[in-house]
Amino acid sequence: MSVLLEALSVGKRFGGVQALKDVSLTIRAQEIYGLIGPNGAGKTTFFNVLTGLYTRDSGDVLLAGAPLPLGSPHLVARAGIARTFQNIRLFGNMTALENVMVGRHVRTRIGMFGAILRTRSQREEEAAIRRRAEELLHYVGIAHRANDLARHLAYGDQRRLEIARALATEPKLLALDEPAAGMNATETGALRQLILGLRADGLTVLLIEHDVKLVMGLCDRVAVLDYGEKIAEDVPEVVQKDAKVIEAYLGGNVGDSST
Amino acid sequence: MDIFLQQIINGLTTGSVYAIVALGYTMVYGVIQLINFAHGEVVMIGAMVAFTVITALVGAGLPLPPIVLVFAGVLTAVPVCMAIGYLLERVAYRPLRHAPRLAPLITAIGMSIILQHLALLIWGRDPRAFPQIMEVTSFNLGGAAISSVQIVIILLSVVMMGVLTWFVYRTRFGIAIRASAEDVRVAALMGVDANRVIAATFIIGAAMGAVAGVMYGTYYGIAHYTMGFTLGLKAFSAAVLGGIGNLAGAMLGGILLGLVEALGAGYIGDLTDLCQWPVFGGLLAERCEADGHVILLGSNYQDVFAFLVLILVLVFRPSGLLGERVAERA
């Protein structure tokens, strides 16, 4: 399988804390790749560096062989990485449909004057954006909530809406930050089906998740971060038995394993 | 003449101008939480540029109809102000985007002073009379007079507010602006170029400010390099009154502020006429008999009302009339 994303010795420091230390990992195309680790291991930091929210201190990230314009979120989005958030960050006062329409900005040329003058091609593009947004809402199964404000949606639907919004950017890599957090067993099961469906449709998925059962059952390969360092990367069966991983999770103080 | 109705009409007129200017403050604040104190100066420059163009055209003696002259003035002022609005953002605020909030605020005050003095250098310190090119006709409306200028100002403002609302709520660029106002970082992750959106809020605000400047100048018949200061502060008060960051709030706040100010100016003289109070009757009997009135505070105190409103809002409802209570973002 071809390599989609390659992180090369990525480092990030916050003051005296080395949040990421020489993290290198390889995600193959159409893979479901899990990133796990104890709280504070640097998973979300890695996500933020990857999506341009944080600038990195060292290292490089290649997406399909080309270096990512790190530190510039809208260019990263254009390059083909989209993400969701651990604590849902929708545009609460906009409708579900509008939320997804925002995601279409990546693939369309927006112009203030064009929007005002409403040329024929502008109107057609706008109609196409609306149609595509409706399709995506349908795809994640919340088409019936299209005109409700995002903050009025049920929790599980908000997670779905975030995924639809991310899909609107036509990503090559979809990065999901703890998508199952706060979900009950039924919702988690449905999410699992959704993620498998995304992969079947050709997408590559990067998954941060605390639900170890979900990760181990869903992911093709898993990387484990601990104190900002990658301590393992392999198929779930191997990672589960890795001594370093077991130590990181259960470690010297069993009572502290908050995961 | 019906004073109440008259002051309502006057208040609606100035209130419309405040509302248009307030929209400029509130749009920028909505996206980057910056109070662009230089916005009042942009409005002033709009008035000055239009004034210069109209005066030049009148001086050239071309037989142009008045409406064309005003139109030419506005059409020149708008792009000039848009350019200034863009430059402000690009040169003064963008480099400070990630600085502590106080830094861009002080910069805004600095830009305001710079623009004001630039105007002083170009147009001088004397108030410039707006050329009286139009015959102002007045209409009788239930005992009050409404002039053609007032009608045009109110109608034009309503149209601008309508177009802006349509733009923000119905076009995809508007959707990008609202998304950025809610969460500029997430909007960027969805491919919205934050710089473009932020620049757009400055440009749109400045364009409307230019029109507001011309309306204000035409209404009072005068333009002066310091006019942007008070006008800007009042419009800012209006934005805070309505709930800063909220478009409908800025419109409502502007109109309300105009009404409060006009009614205040209309009645403060009567209310502070000391002769009507028996307490002072004896004390001032002589003067009351001679003049009939001893007015403590005249209508020139009208500016006080805007800021009185600002203080009351800040004390009793800091989030403004339509503003949401802002929860700290995690």
Image (tube, coloured by chain):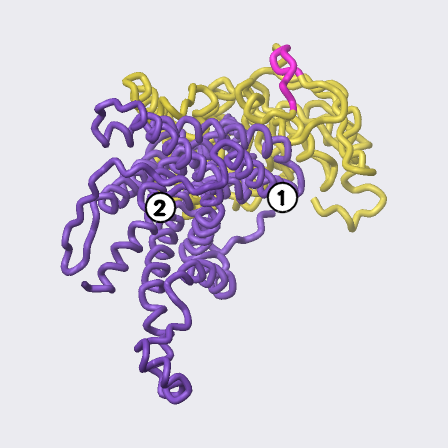
> Quick one: quadrant of the N terminus of chain A?
top right
SS class, disc 1? helix
Q: Specify the chain shown as yellow.
A: A
Q: Position of residue B217 (x, y in %)?
A: 36, 42
- Check the residue under mark 1 and report the chain it is in: B
> Quick one: quadrant of the C terminus of chain A?
top right
Q: How many marks?
A: 2
Identity, as a three-letter code, of the amino acid under mark 1: Ile
Query: Would you call the spot at circle 1 few (<14 residues within 10 Å), some (14-19), or many (20 or more)?
Result: some
Identity, as a three-letter code, of the amino acid under mark 2: Val
- Check the residue under mark 2 and report the chain it is in: B
Front position in the image: A37 or B175 = B175
Q: Position of residue B246 (x, y in %)?
A: 42, 47
Quadrant of res A25: top right
Front position in the image: A194 or B279 = B279
Circles 1, 2 touching at the beta carbon (< 8 Å): no
Query: Which residue is rendered at x = 42% and y = 62% of the image?
Result: B301
Is B292 in the magenta? no
Against A173, residue B116 (above or below) is below
* Residue B103 visible, this angle: yes
Q: Specify the chain shown as purple.
A: B
* Pointer 1 or 2: first along the chain: 2
Q: Would you name the residue on which mark 2 appears?
A: B17
- Magenta range is A62-70
